[in-house]
Amino acid sequence: MAGNIDMIANEEKASRGGSLSDSSQLYIQQRVREKKRSYEDYNFKRHQEEALSTFFDLAQEFTSIDHFYQICVAVPKEFLNIESRLHVFEQKSSKLVLVCTSLEGLLPENQRSDCTLEVKESPYETQESLIYPIPGNEALTRSVPFLTRSSMLGLFEICPKGNLKPNERLFLEKFSNRIGFQLHQKLLIQQNIDHLKFINQLLSDIEHNVINPNMHYKLFLIRFRKGLQAHRALESEFEDILFREKGSIHPLESRLTDLKSRMARNTATMEKEWSAFSKHYEHTSLFLETLLRKDHFEKGTYVLRRQTCNFLKEIVEPLLDRYIATFRKRNIAVDNLLEGVPDDQMTLYVDKGLISQVFDNIFSNAIKYTQEVEDQLGNRIKIFSCNRKILKNFFSEGTHGLRFSFFTTGKPLNEEEAQKIFEGGYRALSSIHERGTGHGLNFVKNVVEVHGGILGCEPQKYGNLIYFVLPLK
């Protein structure tokens, strides 16, 4: 029996830590056969199998953790006439506490005492009790960060231990494992519910403390613009007076002329700063209000607010105007082949805020990753180029596509990199020298696809071309 227990423990460890390969169906089939053999080796009696079935059924029926605690001690009591105590690690303090017993039921939080039992990875016994560890799901822990500091979620105590047979001890060990798997999922569900509540509350705080106060900047810009206009009017009036006095021998004439020149330079500087600040405000406000839209958080996906948008005038030109100085600083030549395209070929019904951020991410990546190459004539070139093309009946009969293409010179990606570049967190080997998270192109993918479009990457001789196609309606 001891050999069987070791074999079963190893199988369950493999189950918790196993990973699905490309031939996942074969792996699953193998695990089914292994489980079938394991249950044959368990040789559980009918009432033990019924106890497991009852436990699983009620664990699904009752969703709250407190109800689940009571199920854990009620099933062994009803089917095996065994008294038990359930100890679990508190999420906040990471302390092991007694939460429920078969004699007292669920303990109120203020009456839950610290547990002095030793936490081990294998079952053990004390003078009065049998102690079974409650393990978490290791595979689930790796994929979803968990709050507990230990891989163990708690202990299942049988007290008094009595004269249990080996088969009954094996059943209690397997039962404790099932408690761990179910408890882990319920704790994660509760953690996610609390997380969503926090996000919704945070969103309300952002709307109240960030987005609404952001409107004050708009009012400030309006007042600043009015002040500039008033200053320009005074400058004009001053210029008229100076013109009438021009040529006079009055000693102030020269000083007034110099003063007028300085006023003009100062006005030009203030208007330039106002223009830059205004564009930055519009850009940031659009992104803030789009990304922090309440609908996204409530639905768990991007929720579009479509409007007619001319890509060239409302998105491309403002962004290029914003980035052009940085392109020049990096000696990147910008070949904007979108210029001169008729308005009706650049107007789509889209979520302007999200699509603007798609272009912003692509331009930002172009600045970071465009590299110098040598063309077929031996010239050193460093180019970022953007273009568009209408694809007739691309999506369906009568539904054309508008394809935007963005080419950057540099080392061409290999086939695997080109396929993975839009995955979240993925970064090509050639990009490791630049700061980044690998999130930008994944955002582009999500936004394009939620608009019903497609996208891709095409490595070419002198660099790489990223494109996306949106329905032209």
Image: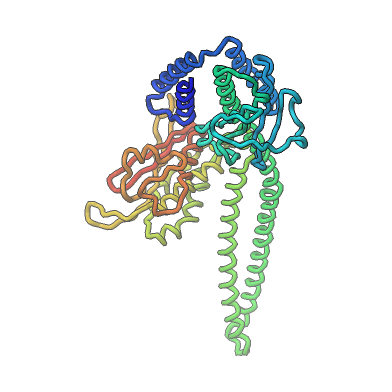
Residue at left 51%, top 16%? 42
Task: Classify 402 as above or below 273.
Answer: above
Res 63 visible: no
| 209 or 166, nearer to the observer | 166
Task: Classify 91 as above or below 244.
Answer: above
Q: How is the image coloured?
A: rainbow
| 258 or 430, nearer to the observer | 430
Q: Position of residue 441 (x, y in %)?
A: 45, 43
The answer to which quarter of the image holds residue 259 is bottom right
Residue at left 49%, top 31%? 452
The answer to which quarter of the image holds residue 305 is top right
Give the side of residue 470 with respect to residue 169, left or right.
left
Give the side of residue 430 with respect to residue 138, left or right.
left
Q: Position of residue 138 (x, y in %)?
A: 51, 33
Single out the residue that lies furthest toward the top. Answer: 46
Res 217 visible: yes
Residue at left 55%, top 21%? 170
| 307 or 108, nearer to the observer | 108
Single out the residue that lies furthest toward the front. Answer: 127
| 80 or 357, nearer to the observer | 80
Q: Position of residue 190 (x, y in %)?
A: 65, 32
Give the side of residue 162 with respect to residue 396, left or right.
right
Q: Position of residue 246 (x, y in %)?
A: 59, 82
> How many numbered discs?
0
